[in-house]
Image: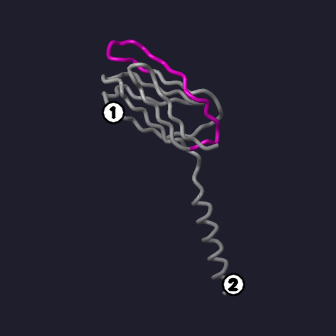
């Protein structure tokens, strides 16, 4: 009986540890400019991600972990080869949730849904 109890307690502990998720941000960059954009880059604390090309109406998902704290920024080039940049929210280590960045003809809209 002692071995069974130890095995059950051990498995329960393993399930609890595996059930904890690391804090990640599920980001999505949406192109609502009406035209293809190029050289899309999202900068966040300690790293960045991006795409060479993002077609009109397309979305690009990316998952990342925040290490450190700091500002975000998105940069892109429109069809007329004009470069754009827009500052976003500050992010902090340990946050998780969703971050949607919508590129428009007028700039960028940030929609963070993050928990501390």
Residue 31 position in % (x across, y down): 37, 28
Q: Is residue 29 magenta?
A: no
Q: Residues within 10 Å of mark 1 (few under 14, many from 20)?
A: few
Residue at coordinates 60% horizontally, 71% vertically from top-left?
11
Residue 90 position in % (x across, y down): 61, 30
Q: Which residue is mark 2?
A: 2
Q: Is residue 83 magenta?
A: yes
Q: Say whether residue 1 is left or right of residue 25.
A: right
Q: Residues within 10 Å of mark 2 (few under 14, many from 20)?
A: few
On-image quarter of the C terminus: top right
Q: In the picture shown, does residue 65 fall above or below 85? A: below
Contact? badges 2 and 1 (CB < 8 Å): no
Residue 63 position in % (x across, y down): 48, 41
Depth order, front residue of 6/20 = 20
Which residue of the protein is positioned furthest toward the front in this rendering?
Answer: 106
In space, the residues marked 2 and 1 are separated at their CA atoms by 58 Å
User: Which element carries disc 1, helix, strand or loop?
Assistant: loop
Q: Which residues are magenta?
A: 76-96
User: Could you say which quadrant of the image residue 32 lies in?
Assistant: top left
Residue at coordinates 39% horizontally, 35% vertically from top-left?
60
Residue at coordinates 64% horizontally, 71% vertically from top-left?
10
Pointer 2 or 1: first along the chain:
2
User: Which element carries disc 2, helix, strand or loop?
Assistant: helix
Q: Say whether residue 34 is left or right of residue 10.
A: left
On-image quarter of the N terminus: bottom right
Q: Say whether residue 14 is left or right of residue 34.
A: right
Residue at coordinates 63% horizontally, 77% vertically from top-left?
7
Which residue of the protein is positioned furthest toward the right in this rendering?
Answer: 2
Disc on res. 58: 1
User: Could you say which quadrant of the image residue 83 lies in?
Assistant: top left
Q: In the picture shown, does residue 114 fall above or below 53? A: below
Q: How many marks?
A: 2
């Amino acid at each position: 009986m002692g071995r069974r109890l130890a095995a059950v307690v051990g498995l329960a502990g393993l399930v609890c540890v595996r059930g904890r998720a690391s804090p990640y941000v599920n980001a999505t960059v949406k192109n609502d400019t009406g035209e293809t954009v190029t050289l899309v880059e999202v900068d966040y604390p300690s790293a960045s991600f991006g795409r060479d090309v993002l077609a009109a109406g397309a979305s690009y998902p990316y998952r990342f972990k925040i290490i450190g704290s700091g500002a975000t920024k998105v940069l892109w080039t429109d069809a007329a080869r004009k470069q754009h940049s827009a500052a976003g929210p500050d992010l902090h280590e340990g946050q998780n949730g969703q971050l949607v960045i919508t590129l428009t003809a007028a700039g960028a809209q940030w929609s963070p849904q993050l928990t501390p």
